Image (cartoon, grey):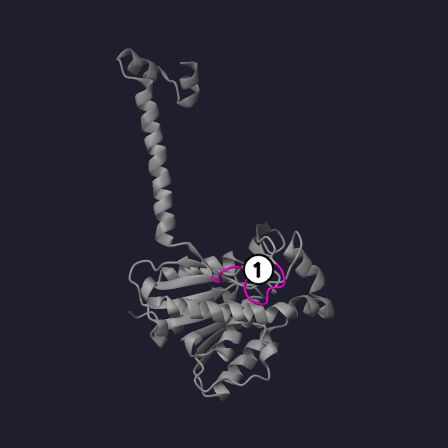
């Protein structure tokens, strides 16, 4: 009796019920059933979001110098969840909600090739797309090896361009290779997930925008994206790379007050695409800084994803 008093609320009503011959075990069973129901609802919600993890390679991918434990944590500096020390790339799947449009997108979070801003530039975007009938895959691509807090290291090292590039430049080709592998995988398995291999696009932010541009400029027939959307990308790596004649249509968004000085990169990419006579749309916002993602900051750049949705609609990607 003492043990049961600690398991469920023991009230006068309970005592009356006991006097009527109802067992406390009946109430404990009811409480357990309620807990099980809540747990089931949580599992069903997770299943509805379709958050399956897909390993992009079997074992350590080609070119990786070493294998480090992946780290997931909340960064106080970036004020968001981040992932660091990715050596085994993977895809996080979000299944479409409601009507399946038959379109899919690979999403590449940013983070200076030292971490991945997995929520605001990954999962949040995936959920937004899934709500509009798009199958979304968040890519965790390879990044540089860092210590306890990659975001702190980024803040410290970024101003020293020589040290920064010495750290991240070797991993950039690996990150782009992961982007190409991701598009290949998604296209190859399109029928399994219910979309067309010819309706697979890629969107990326900052360093993920670099990955996106790398894919849009270096694809082969098996991993050509249907559309690309680099958001405030770092594009200097590709200044001398020509746009392919059959390059996909592009959507670009950035802020003029980008505090990393990357606003001109977005303009340069737009000019490269238009010079190649490939459809392009550019949105330059007066305020937004760098790394605005899908979080609302009370600045003009907050509306970028709505304009992205308009663009997807106009291109036919949100029509079944």
Residue at 65%, 67% in the rendered image? 168
In depth, the one of 198 and 284 nearer the eye is: 198
Report the side of 169 relative to 303 (left or right): right
Which quadrant would the N terminus be assigned to in this image? top left
Q: Is residue 36 above or below residue 313?
A: above
| Image label count | 1
- Which residue, as the protein is rendered here, is positioned at the far top? 19
Image x and y of residue 120, in percent: 51, 58
Q: Residue at x 32, y 68 (%)?
A: 102
Nearest the camera: 44 or 58? 58
Mark 1 lies on a secondary structure that is loop
Task: Please identify the dominant SS of the magenta region.
Answer: loop
Q: Residue at x 35, y 52 (%)?
A: 48
Confirm whether residue 225 shows in the render: no
Q: Is residue 269 visible?
A: yes
Quarter location, residue 94 = bottom left
Q: Which residues are magenta?
A: 56-66
Name the residue nearer the viewer: 167 or 188.
188
Q: Tell me what residue is drawn at x 59 percent, y 82 percent.
A: 239
Instruction: Count neighbours of disc 1 (C-alpha within 10 A) and say few if under 14, some if 14 to 19, many if 20 or more.
Output: many
Q: Is residue 61 left or right of residue 3?
A: right
Residue 208 in the image, given as x and y percentages of width and height:
54, 67
Horizontal and vertical percent for residue 35?
Answer: 37, 34
**Image quadrant for the C terminus?**
bottom left
Question: Is residue 173 left or right of 305 when viewed as pictured?
Answer: right
Q: Which residue is mark 1?
A: 87
The question of residue 125 being in magenta is answered with no
Which residue sits furthest left?
20
Residue 19: where, in percent of width, then height? 29, 11
Is 64 one of the magenta-colored residues?
Answer: yes
């Amino acid at each position: 009796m003492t043990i049961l008093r600690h398991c469920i609320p023991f009230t006068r009503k309970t005592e009356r019920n006991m006097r009527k011959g109802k067992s406390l075990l009946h109430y404990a069973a009811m409480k357990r059933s309620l807990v099980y129901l809540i747990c089931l609802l949580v599992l069903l919600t997770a299943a509805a979001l379709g958050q399956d993890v897909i390993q992009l390679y079997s074992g350590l991918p080609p070119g990786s110098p070493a294998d480090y434990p992946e780290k997931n944590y909340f960064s106080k500096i970036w004020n968001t969840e981040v992932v660091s020390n990715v050596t085994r790339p993977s895809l996080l799947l979000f299944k479409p909600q409601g009507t399946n449009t038959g379109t899919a997108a690979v999403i590449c979070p940013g983070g200076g090739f030292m971490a991945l801003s997995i929520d605001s530039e990954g999962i949040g975007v995936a959920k937004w797309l899934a709500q509009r009938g798009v199958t979304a895959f968040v890519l965790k691509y390879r990044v540089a090896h860092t210590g306890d807090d990659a975001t702190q290291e980024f803040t410290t090292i970024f101003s020293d361009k020589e040290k920064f590039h010495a750290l991240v430049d070797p991993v950039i080709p690996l990150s782009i290779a992961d982007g190409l592998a991701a598009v290949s995988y998604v296209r190859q398995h399109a029928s399994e997930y219910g979309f067309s291999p010819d309706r697979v696009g890629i969107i990326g932010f900052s360093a993920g925008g670099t990955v996106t541009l790398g894919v849009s400029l270096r694809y082969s027939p098996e991993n050509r994206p249907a559309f690309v959307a680099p958001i405030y990308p770092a594009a200097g790596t590709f200044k001398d790379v020509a746009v392919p004649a059959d390059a996909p249509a592009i959507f670009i968004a950035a802020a003029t007050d980008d505090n990393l000085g990357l606003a001109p990169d977005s303009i340069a990419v737009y000019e490269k695409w238009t010079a190649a006579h490939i459809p392009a749309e550019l949105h330059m916002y007066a305020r937004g800084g760098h790394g605005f993602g899908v979080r609302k900051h009370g600045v003009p750049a907050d509306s970028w994803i709505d304009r992205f949705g308009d663009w997807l609609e106009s291109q036919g990607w949100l029509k079944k």
